[in-house]
Image: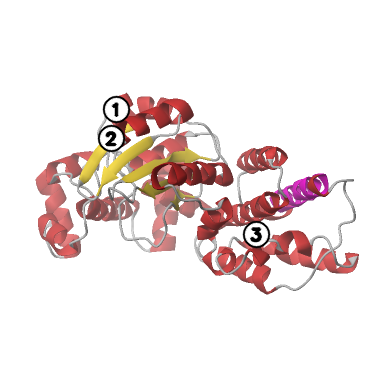
Amino acid sequence: MNYVTFCKNYYAVTGIPTNLITEAGAIYSALSEQLHISTESPYPLYPSDYNPEFRFASPDIVYGSVQIEATGEYIILGPVFSVPVTDELVRSYMHDSATPLKYKEVIAEALASIPRLSHIQFCQHLVFLHQCVNHKEISVLKLLGQRAPQQLRQSQQHLKSITENMENKKMHNTYQFECELFQFVQNGNVNALQNFLKNNTLQLEEGRLAKTPIRHAKNLFIVTAIKTAVLGAIPGGVDIEKTYQLLDLYIQECEALQSLEKIQALQYSMILDFCQQAGETKIPAGISREVYTCMNFIRTHTNESISVNDVADSIQKSTSYTMKKFKTELGFTIGTFITRCKLEEAKMLLTYSTKSLAEISSYLCFSSQPHFQSLFKKQYHMTPLEYRKKSGVMDTIRL
């Protein structure tokens, strides 16, 4: 089989960016061919126990890979988004793929054209590809179980626990269980939530919500999804509009399912997803929301020439107020933090990309390559090239 042609056809039919790579380099990239832009893949290859594999680049950006067992090549799907593509998501993708800011408009247009998929829908694509190229079958539940290895890989029985917990117990216990469940979601600690669901032995009564088991399961899913969103995710700090977009997507996905097992799997995935979203919004102790917003603004704009004024504008405060508050809470200046974030990004590019020092310096908007090298050596006590040699990590594949 000509796998380049296969990838091109798959992209043409599905609209999902499809790439063919090896450990030695890229063979084909749908987005690069379409946009005539060479970017660094945010999907470095490394030994994995999974084939296919489902991986998060962030809570809203996912990738998947299928290794072609006959050739050792990899088909990479992604990026794929479960929410509408916002300016923030575009910047996040460009940051991860080390794409220069001048391409922002064309990148944004390309990403917006990618179909939105739930995690289960995306896993179904990976399952189909695996069957096509390797002639092997794998269940969506097993693939989705990579998100929660302690639970789903042990047995499918745990995957059913959420639905069972909401079907068979007295009402006073239902309220107690739900309060704990939504508090875990609000806290944003996925591991704690997984342990709670694994160890909880309550079985809760919701009554019959429909005449057929499938309709009952769907109605129960909708009730649970709304409660998880309103009582867990939103109080946990997840943006209200984003929460309702995810809620709509999950309900639509549930309505399309015709299997109790898949509805249960989607319910489990939905609760974990809302919990993970809440966890992304958590602010470290001792740091105000304003300063935390400034820090996130700086981290996501390392490839731009940002100033203290830009940082202050991100929280709609004066420059003097922002500088004073930042220094008081963190003990160092905004300028110092900007430089530190750019240098940390430089370390990643030196380790996982094939960009030259000049390209890295330009991409991160240092005033000059010598200035970049001087700051790097001062911070890490070695030159950028010395660091690249020392890291010894396989270069990220250039797509």
> Dominant secondary structure of the magenta stretch?
helix
Q: Amino acid at mark 2?
A: Tyr
Between circles 1 and 2, the one closer to the viewer is 2
Tell me if residue 161 can be seen.
Answer: yes
Would residue 228 be counted in the magenta stretch? yes
**Helix, strand or loop for disc 1:** helix
188 sits left or right of 286 in the view: right
Where are the magenta residues, as a range? 215-230
Residue at the spot 70% in from the left edge and 49% down from the top edge:
263
Q: Residues within 10 Å of mark 1 (few under 14, many from 20)?
A: few
Q: Do tag 1 and tag 2 residues touch (Cβ < 8 Å)?
A: yes
**Helix, strand or loop for disc 2:** strand
Counting the numbered discs, the total is: 3
267 sits left or right of 15 in the view: right
Q: Amino acid at mark 3?
A: Val
Residue under pointer 1: 33
Depth order, front residue of 267/94: 267
Say which mark, if any, is on residue 28: 2
